Image (cartoon, helix red, strand yellow):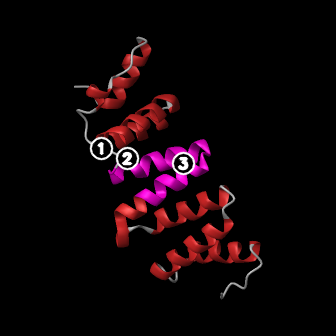
């Protein structure tokens, strides 16, 4: 039996796409894995399309939010990355990882939302006070905003 990534590539070679009903048979974890496989095989267009379908089918799934946020980062679609990462963090609550916090901070910074990035760094450090990457981001943003790093 072909996995989702293989089915998508085979259908694309024949000029077909999978419809929403066909994609809906897969779990969010399977969709995430297929997106990762497609990106690894330089099938970015298929990965982006599958990400959009996965988000439409499973808008609250942490798997889908995480992978589509990463796709947005790859595309340098910073506002979309910010939106997706904020949704992911809202879903994860206190379980949001350092990586998720760092990706949100970077996406905000790249979207030129320095004040929001600084606030996100402050919030992340409240949860992970000694994390070197978060400290580095906080200090860089404080400097960029002309603030003291201890504010």
Q: Earlier in the sequence, mark 2 or mark 1?
A: 1
The residue located at (47%, 62%) in the rendering is 100
The answer to which of 89 and 42 lies nearer the viewer is 89
Q: Is residue 42 visible?
A: no
- Which residue is labeled 2 in the image? 64
Q: If the image is split into quadrants, where does the N terminus sit?
A: top left
Which quadrant is home to the C terminus?
bottom right
> Are there few (<14), some (14-19), or many (20+) residues within 10 Å of tag 1?
many
Q: Is residue 16 above or below residue 23?
A: above
Q: Residue 59: percent from the left, percent from the top?
A: 35, 46
Residue at the image position 42 percent from the left and 57 percent from the top: 87
* Disc 3 secondary structure class: helix
* Mark 3 neighbour class, 10 Å CA radius: few under 14, some 14 to 19, many 20 or more: some
**Magenta segment range?**
60-87
Query: Disc 2, disc 1: CB below 8 Å?
Result: yes
Total marks placed: 3
User: In the rendering, at what x and y percent does residue 105 appear?
Assistant: 58, 65
Q: Nearer the viewer, mark 2 or mark 3?
A: 3
């Amino acid at each position: 039996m072909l996995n989702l990534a293989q089915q998508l590539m085979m259908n694309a070679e024949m000029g077909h796409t999978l419809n929403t009903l066909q994609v809906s048979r897969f779990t969010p974890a399977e969709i995430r894995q297929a997106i990762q496989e497609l990106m690894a095989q330089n099938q970015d267009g298929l990965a982006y399309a599958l990400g959009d379908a996965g988000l439409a089918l499973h808008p609250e799934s942490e798997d889908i939010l995480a992978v589509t946020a990463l796709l947005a980062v790859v595309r340098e679609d910073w506002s979309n990355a910010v939106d997706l990462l904020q949704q992911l963090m809202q879903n994860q609550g206190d379980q949001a990882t350092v990586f998720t916090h760092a990706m949100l901070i970077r996406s905000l910074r790249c979207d030129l939302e320095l004040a929001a990035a600084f606030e996100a760094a402050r919030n992340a450090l409240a949860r992970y006070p000694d994390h070197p990457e978060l400290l580095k981001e906080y200090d860089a943003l404080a400097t960029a905003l002309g603030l003291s790093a201890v504010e």
